[in-house]
Amino acid sequence: MNYRHIFHAGNAADVMKHAVLAWLLDRLLAKETPFFVLDTHAGIGRYDLDDQAASRTGEALRGIRRVMDGNGAASLPEGAKPYLDLLARLNEGAAGVRTYPGSPLIARMMMREQDRLLLAELHADDVQTLRSLFRGDVQVSVHHMDGWLSLKAHLPPKERRGLVVIDPPFEAPDEYERLVAALALAHRRWATGQYLLWYPVKDRAAVWQFHQMLEDTGIPKMLAAELCWSDDDRSDRLNGSGLILVNPPWKTEETLSSLLPALQTALAAGVGPVGCRWLRDENGKPA
Ligand code: SAM
């Protein structure tokens, strides 16, 4: 395991993923009943963008810092509000964004006292950092375990309502296949849960094959969203960021259709493809 998220924290892919995550969590807040969040590949939860590792790659400069330091944030639509509010809360009194929330902290900051968060992280050092972030927090449990196995171990949750975030590092050559198999397994255990899966957009043929495999699972109500910063078709570089949403709430398509192009503009992310489309609609029909 070589991947460390600190080198990538706050990059354009994080901005897309986390803006959508915060919006989904905000929708879960609409009902009083408790919700559960499982984050299978949690990372360390909170990132200092001035840290040496983060500064070395400078990815946040082309990501969240570009959005916040320019005028980009002001022109973002309503769908970005939960994410922007959270960043403002976390960096209150500071100039710009220095502290950047990973998916665990985003979930934690948006939860109420009735909600529960379960985190899986396999890296021995990173899980310790994550543990110290949530030490003493009775609503959060941190597990040093394989995130793929956590799906089997912890689904379905007793709350019967909530979200599963699956955000693997894509280090293994078969990560797309793994993601599809994991979703199929999780969905068999908990068909009514919401799912948010991240994937890299590299060459189009690989993405097309991935979408085809997802369609072949027959899972209904599955939306694919992408924000690309290049229309290159090269497999050796990240050309964009993709998300698969299963059972997304009402108005997701409408929200993403305005949010994603606006984020692309705020990121000055060029002219790559952006938008979303149903892989299967709510009746299970390929769209
Ligand atoms: N979801 C995080 C966020 O948005 O802030 C970022 C996660 S990062 C892309 C992937 C993480 O998965 C890394 O911290 C890595 O150590 C961890 N990881 C790699 N393989 C894993 C596995 N099999 N199970 C759990 N965690 C794993």
Image (cartoon, grey):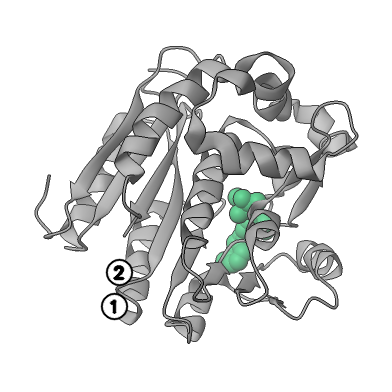
| Rendered-image quarter of ligand 1 | bottom right
Of the pair 202 and 20, the residue shown nearer to us:
20
Circle 1 packing at 10 Å, graded few (<14), some (14-19), many (20+), is few
Q: Secondary structure at mark 2?
A: helix
User: Which quadrant would the C terminus be assigned to in this image?
Assistant: top left
Which residue in the structure is indicated by mark 1?
188
Query: Distance from label 1 to label 2 (Cα)?
Result: 6 Å
Please provide percent x and percent y for residue 198. Answer: 46, 48
Which residue in the structure is indicated by mark 2?
184
Marks 2 and 1: in contact by CB < 8 Å?
yes
Q: Is residue 194 left or right of residue 115?
A: left
Q: Is residue 224 visible?
A: yes
Please provide percent x and percent y for residue 15. Answer: 59, 35
Q: Secondary structure at mark 1?
A: helix
**Amino acid bearing label 1:** Arg
Q: Is residue 170 visible?
A: no
Residue at disc 2, CB closer than 8 Å to ligand 1: no
Q: Is residue 1 left or right of residue 211?
A: right
Please provide percent x and percent y for residue 97. Answer: 79, 32
Which dot marks residue 96?
A: none
User: Which quadrant would the N terminus be assigned to in this image?
Assistant: bottom right
- Measuring 90% from the left and 35% from the top, which residue is drawn there? 93
Relative to 250, say whether 260 is above or below: above
Please provide percent x and percent y for residue 44. Answer: 75, 57
- Measuring 48% from the left and 37% from the top, which residue is drawn there? 79
